Amino acid sequence: MNPKSGLRVFTAFATAALLALPMAAGAESQRVTIVHFNDLDRMGEDDGRGGVARLAAVINGERDMGGVVLATFGGDTISPSLMSGIDEGAHMIDLLNGLGLTAMVLGNHEYDFGPDITRQRISEAEFPVLGANSIGPDGTIIEGALPSIMVEAGDFSIGILGLTTVGTLVKSSPGEIDILDPVGVAAAEAERLRGEGADLVIALTHTDIEEDRALIANRDMDILLSGDDHLLAAEYDGKLLFAESGEQAEWVTVVDLVLDKVMKDDQEKTVWSAEYRIVDTAHVTPDAALAEAVAAYEAQLSEDLDVQVGVTATALDTRRSTVRGMEAAFGNLVADAIREATGADLGVMNGGGIRADRLYDPGTMLSRRDIISELPFGNKTVVLEITGQDFIDMMENSVSQLEKGAGRFLHLSGASARFDPSAEPGSRVLAVMVNGEAIDPSQTFTLAVNDYLAGGGDGFSMLKDKKRIVDEYASVLMTVQLFDYMEARGEVAPMVEGRLEAAK
């Protein structure tokens, strides 16, 4: 549906219905503006769009026009940025504190560093953090979060409740925190808010599209402001409004509400109507104070990248001819790191994603900057469900263009393979082994792989439609996983050990 064309029809319907009802004596209509965004972990702009400073300009611009302005954030901020791998998202909470948020809901990425860090970030927030369905072992909401808040707008009370996707349980690391079904929690919390006098109920959620649809079907709220799927979408049928604002504050949804009191069956009743605007932040001037704060953090990040992460006790060879045609110790290191970070059965790393073209002597101390120079594309690690046959097909693709030095050549963790470079492409794989035995084509495995390959890049079309256990929106930067892997050990000793063997 075209949001704007649908808006005109439904808004006209709602206004006509409102005019047909007598106004309550002495009642005055109340205008409320909501600025909604979601999925913001990038503090700076990208190609002149998005980021905290441009978002601040949109919010401040609405406030400068006067009236009641609510700023709502649909969650996912403390991860997965490069700097979050260093400070576990503290910089994003600090920057968000400069926006004057009405409320934020917990996203799945708020649990990426475990529930203790979630609690710490909540405690640092100078705005309410909502999480009605994030429940600890004692049956109460995670410490510091609130199930909902009540906001006063003139003579009207607006209840805002917060809900997090159940997918957090597999996408992230909530530990002892359970995520309850958002539909049931929404019904109970909305009823409680209305019982306490809420004239309008807003559900601020970080829920996937299926959960959104279920919430909409139940219609326990008046407005659903969501996140998680990175959709840029808005729909309004005169009774319920749904909006999600893409990602990274590249676009921001602004909802303009009018609330009125009317008399119906000798009882006073609240009615409301809405219009919405999609604001492209490429067309605003970044807020100067927030831009300065972002610049300070970016300067700090540059210094932090020179921090040492660990020693390699063995030689590493990341030259193009090595990583694209034979087993390489660095390729093994990356595949091992992402496999361990995700708990997957298998891990792979494509040689084309390794870029520094260097030799490292045994005993070299590696820095974060070294890791980023090797893995410069900002890829995230996703987890797919595949079969043994899928993995065999992957290996055939991996060695199908050896003579061209193609970047599709895979380095493995949790498996080994033998291949014949002289055979015809598509028939080069001689054996694929898992746990010392030939892989079972019908067996199911979980696979840690970067988002580029998971999307079918480099000829890996067999992965494109596979079930996502952890998708790209819930994933973590590969570089951060390698930081963590090396820092936890202090010293690594990856070797060429027969994971990939070319027949002679």
Image (cartoon, rainbow, N blue to C red):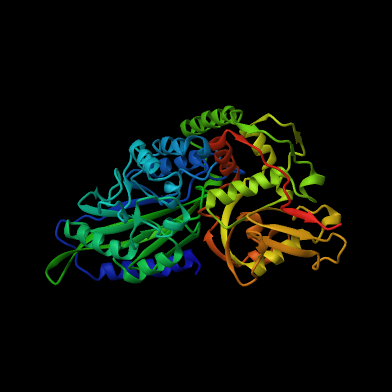
The image position of residue 92, as x and y in percent, is: 45, 39
**Residue at 67% in and 41% down:** 494
The image position of residue 47, as x and y in percent, is: 62, 44
Is residue 476 among the parts visible in the rendering? Answer: no
**Residue at 66% in and 59% down:** 436
Residue found at the very far left of the displayed protein: 266
Up the image or down, 14 lies above or below 45; here it is: below
Q: Nearer the viewer, residue 425 or 247?
A: 425
Q: Nearer the viewer, residue 11 or 46?
A: 46
Image position of 494 (left or right of 191): right
The image position of residue 247, as x and y in percent, is: 51, 51
Image position of 462 (left or right of 272): right
Q: Nearer the viewer, residue 82 or 57?
A: 82
Residue found at the very far front of the displayed protein: 436
Up the image or down, 402 lies above or below 281; here it is: below
Quadrant placement of the C terminus = bottom right
Is residue 315 among the parts visible in the rendering? Answer: yes
The image position of residue 369, as x and y in percent, is: 64, 33
Q: Nearer the viewer, residue 165 or 407?
A: 407
Q: How many marks?
A: 0
**Residue at 72% in and 31% down:** 362
Up the image or down, 362 lies above or below 159; here it is: above
